[in-house]
C-alpha cells in the first residue's frame, strides 16, 4: 500500500540547515526565551543573514514549524506504507514518528512552545494533523480491518481519530519514549485484535 506524501516546502540546502538549527533552539529554550541571535549562532550564520531570510522571530518560528511537520509527516507515511509489515506494527511506528519521538526532549519551556505553536502556527498544525489522520485512515481502509469497522458502524476516519488522540495523549503524559511505545502498542494491539481472529470479521 502506498500513501501519497505531501510535497516538501520550497527550501534550499542552506535554509534547511538554518531551519533545523532553529527547531533545535526553539525545542530547547521555548519560543519566548529564544532569540534571533541564538538561532544565528546555532546555524552558523550572521544575525543580518538571518534577518535577510526571516523578518522576525515569529516568521522564523512559523517556517520552522512547517519544515518540521512536513518531514514528520513524510516519515510517518513511509512507515504506514511499508510492505510486508503488519498493520499493528505500521500504526505503532507511524504514531511513534509523529508524536513519540518528541517525548522527553523538550526543554523546561515546553508549555510556552506549545502555546506559541497554537497561537502562531495553529492553522499549519491543524493542517498537518488532518493529513496525518487521513494517512492513518487510508492504512486502515486498505486493510482487512476495514470490514470490522463497517460491521461496527465505524469509518476508518473514526479509528484514525481515536488512534491520533491516543498518540497525542501519550505524548503529553509519557515520561519516556519507551513508555509512549508501550501505551501505543497496547492501543494498536487492541484495535487490531480482530486480525488475529479472522472469523470474527464480517466479509461483505
Image (tube, rainbow, N blue to C red):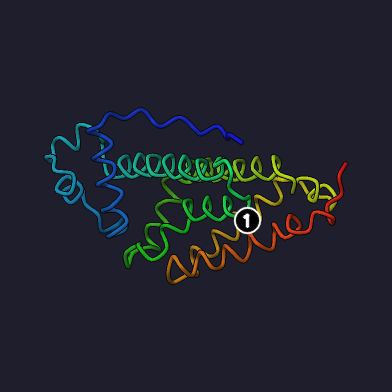
Where 176 sits versus 17, above or below? below
Front residue (pair 61, 14): 14
Q: Quadrant of the C terminus?
A: top right
Q: Residue 117: horizontal and vertical position, in percent?
A: 42, 51
Dot 1 corresponds to which residue? 163
Q: Which quadrant would residue 102 be assigned to in this image?
A: bottom left
Label 1 element class: helix
Where 92 sits versus 107, above or below? above
User: Does residue 21 appear to the left or right of 177 in the view shown?
Assistant: left
Instruction: Please tell me how crowded label 1 is: few (under 14), some (14-19), or many (20+) other residues with Cα within 10 Å.
Output: many
Q: Which quadrant would residue 106 be assigned to in this image?
A: bottom left
Which residue of the protein is positioned furthest toward the front in this rendering? 84
User: Does residue 33 appear to the left or right of 49 in the view shown?
Assistant: right
Where 183 sits versus 84, above or below? below
User: Does residue 129 appear to the left or right of 48 in the view shown?
Assistant: right
Q: Residue at x 25, y 32 (%)?
A: 13
Q: Residue at x 41, y 41 (%)?
A: 71
Front residue (pair 187, 23): 187
Q: Residue 88: horizontal and vertical position, in percent?
A: 62, 54
Q: Residue at x 45, y 29 (%)?
A: 7
Number of numbered labels in the structure image = 1
User: Does residue 135 appear to the left or right of 99 in the view shown?
Assistant: right
Q: Quadrant of the N terminus?
A: top right
Q: Residue 160: horizontal and vertical position, in percent?
A: 65, 50
Q: Residue 79: horizontal and vertical position, in percent?
A: 51, 45
Amino acid at each position: 500500500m502506498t500513501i501519497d506524501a505531501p510535497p516538501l516546502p520550497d527550501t534550499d540546502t542552506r535554509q534547511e540547515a538554518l531551519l533545523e538549527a532553529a527547531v533545535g533552539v526553539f525545542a530547547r529554550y521555548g519560543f519566548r526565551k529564544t532569540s534571533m541571535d541564538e538561532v544565528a549562532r546555532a546555524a552558523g550564520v550572521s544575525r543580518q543573514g538571518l534577518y535577510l531570510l526571516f523578518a522576525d522571530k515569529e516568521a522564523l518560528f512559523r517556517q520552522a514549524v512547517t519544515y518540521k511537520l512536513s518531514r514528520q509527516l513524510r516519515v510517518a507515511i513511509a512507515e504506514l506504507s511499508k510492505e510486508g509489515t503488519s498493520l499493528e506494527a505500521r500504526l505503532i511506528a507511524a504514531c511513534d514518528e509523529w508524536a513519540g519521538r518528541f517525548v522527553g526532549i523538550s526543554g523546561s519551556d515546553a508549555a510556552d512552545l506549545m502555546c506559541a505553536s497554537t497561537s502562531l502556527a495553529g492553522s499549519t498544525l491543524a493542517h498537518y494533523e488532518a493529513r496525518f489522520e487521513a494517512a492513518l485512515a487510508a492504512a486502515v481502509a486498505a486493510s482487512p480491518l476495514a470490514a470490522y469497522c463497517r460491521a461496527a458502524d465505524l469509518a476508518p476516519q473514526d479509528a484514525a481519530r481515536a488512534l491520533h488522540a491516543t498518540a497525542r495523549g501519550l505524548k503529553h503524559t509519557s515520561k519516556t519514549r519507551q513508555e509512549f511505545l508501550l501505551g501505543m502498542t497496547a492501543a494498536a494491539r487492541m484495535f487490531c485484535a480482530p486480525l488475529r481472529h479472522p472469523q470474527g470479521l464480517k466479509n461483505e
